[in-house]
Amino acid sequence: HDKGAQIMNYVLAVFAIGFIVLAHELGHLIAAKMAGIPIRTFSVGFGPRLFSVRKGGTEYRLSLVPLGGYVMPDIEDENAFFDFSISRRIILSAGGPAASLVLPVFCFALSDMLRLGPGITTLLIEPLSQTATVFLKTVSAIPLLFTHYGELSGIAGIVSQGGRFIALDGHNLLSFSAIISVNLAVLNLLPIPVLDGGKILMYALEKLSRRFVRLHYPLAIAGWVLMLAVMAYATVLDVGRFTGGQIL
């Protein structure tokens, strides 16, 4: 029974992460609609398509691997994206992190309502305060990435920690979702070219000089290499923890 409950907690953690990423991508989709940027594909998940429906010129797709998603603008080629104004592109990039900061407010509010019982109306002030606190703590922890890099966790480590956290109290599922969502927002706001924050920075620099357009793709490739290297390193650390040995 305990083993089954433990597995269920890990499954809940996986679904929570999937929902958090979905909310982030929905933020990009809503921002694109607001900015007047047509979207060709909105996918929940990566990899082969399982199911899709087309509505309003956009294909809404469910793909095989549920951890993640993406929004693809409806353009003829990559360069055509830069024909959209800088402000519209910034709105598109900012939509994801904005959604990732709105979701925790609702998670904390729902958690408070469940904890306090029916009939209790939770004011938004406390959930906003909790979200702001987690945000500031996460931002202040960024320097630790460079000094405590041996404590990095990949997706497996996050799921493992989430499963244990949820096991302590069912309401922790909402708190876990809120914390991870804030972490996703902060991560995406880092000035790394492939991330939303990096894109916003590049668009701002482009306002100073159009020559920065030429740097988008080489810097994006460098950003991908960096992110993949960090993810691989974190995964190796996770494996080391799971097997009881320190690999690195």
Image (cartoon, rainbow, N blue to C red):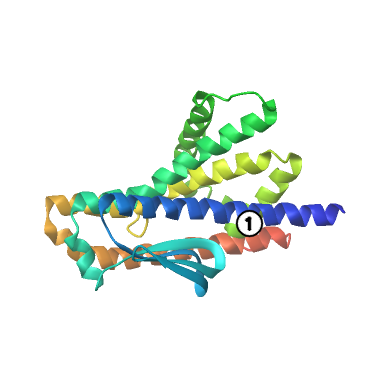
Of the pair 246 and 145, the residue shown nearer to us: 145
Residue 177 image offset from top left, x and y in percent: 58, 45
Q: Which of the 4 quarters of the picture holds residue 112?
A: top right
Residue 192 image offset from top left, x and y in percent: 35, 55
The residue indicated by pointer 1 is 14
What residue occupies the far front of the structure in this picture? 55
In the image, is 117 to the left or to the right of 41?
right
For badge 1, the amino acid type reads Val
Q: Residue at x 69, y 30 (%)?
A: 115
Q: Residue at x 63, y 30 (%)?
A: 113
Residue 102 image offset from top left, x and y in percent: 46, 39
- Callout 1: 10 Å neighbours few (<14), some, many (20+)? many
Q: Quadrant of the N terminus?
A: bottom right
In the image, is 235 to the left or to the right of 170?
left
Could you tell me how many numbered marks the image carries? 1
Residue 207 image offset from top left, x and y in percent: 15, 51
Q: Is residue 196 visible?
A: yes
> Circle 1 — which element?
helix
Of the pair 5 and 217, the residue shown nearer to us: 5
Q: Is residue 40 above or below residue 134?
A: below
Q: Residue at x 53, y 37 (%)?
A: 106
